[in-house]
Image (tube, helix red, strand yellow):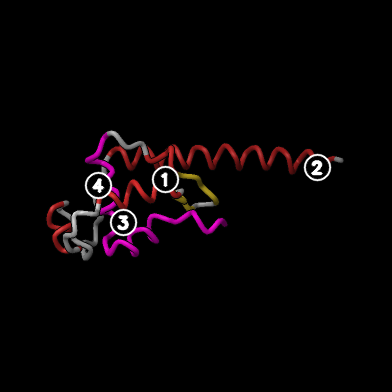
Amino acid sequence: MSDNLKTIRELADELGVSKQAIWQKIKRDTSIDLRQFTSTKGNTVYVNVDGQKTIKSMFKNGSSTKEHQHKDDIDDNEKDAVYDQDEVKFLRNLVSEIQSEKKELHKLLDQQQRL
């Protein structure tokens, strides 16, 4: 994997916030379509450099993690994570893409085994 790609978890750790805080910021800024900044390998979503800059710029107001959590109504200790509809749609699209890729790979594997 290229060094310039990071997961949402890596970005959250780097910024000192939760993954949910990042999703909440993205949800609130409707001008951002995260899909243009991401790629998927296996079950992991990677964010490219432009996406990292965009996400980091959302958190550049200098407030602490607790303030972010309060402002975004997020508690890292919550057991039941609340997912918004945009995140669910995004994840469902990723699952669909992965399933399509899996079907294609199975088809190619079957063809190869026949040869």
Does 26 appear above or below 62?
above
Disc 4: CA contacts within 10 A as few (<14), some (14-19) or many (>=20): some
x and y, in percent, of residue 24 in the image = 24, 47
**Mark 4 and mark 1 residues within 8 Å of each other at the beta carbon:** no
Mark nearer the viewer, 3 or 2 = 3
Q: Nearer the viewer, mark 4 or mark 2?
A: 4
SS assignment at label 4: helix
- Which one is closest to the eye, mark 1 or mark 3? 1
Quarter occupied by residue 12? bottom left
CB atoms of marks 2 and 1 within 8 Å: no
Q: Which mark is residue 19?
A: 3
Query: Where are the magenta residues, as a range?
Result: 1-30
| Mark sitting earlier along the chain (4/2) | 4
Report which residue position mark 4 lands on: 25
Residue pictured at 34% horizontal, 46% vertical = 54
Q: Look at the picture and state if 88 lies above or below 81.
A: above
Residue 61 lies in magenta, yes or no? Answer: no
Tag 3 and tag 4, C-beta contact below 8 Å: no
Q: CA distance from mark 4 to mark 2?
A: 46 Å
Q: Nearer the viewer, residue 79 or 57?
A: 57
Q: Which residue in the structure is indicated by mark 1?
A: 50
**Separation (CA) of disc 3 from disc 4:** 10 Å
Cα distance, mark 4 to mark 1? 16 Å
Instruction: Decide which of 6, 42 is in the foreground and name it.
Output: 6
Q: Which residue is mark 2?
A: 112
User: What amino acid type should be assigned to the residue bearing mark 2?
Assistant: Gln
Of labels 4 and 1, the one closer to you:
1
Other-residue count near label 3 (Cα within 10 Å), few / some / many at <14 / 14–19 / ≥20: some
Question: Which residue shows up at 28% across the image and 60% down it?
Answer: 18
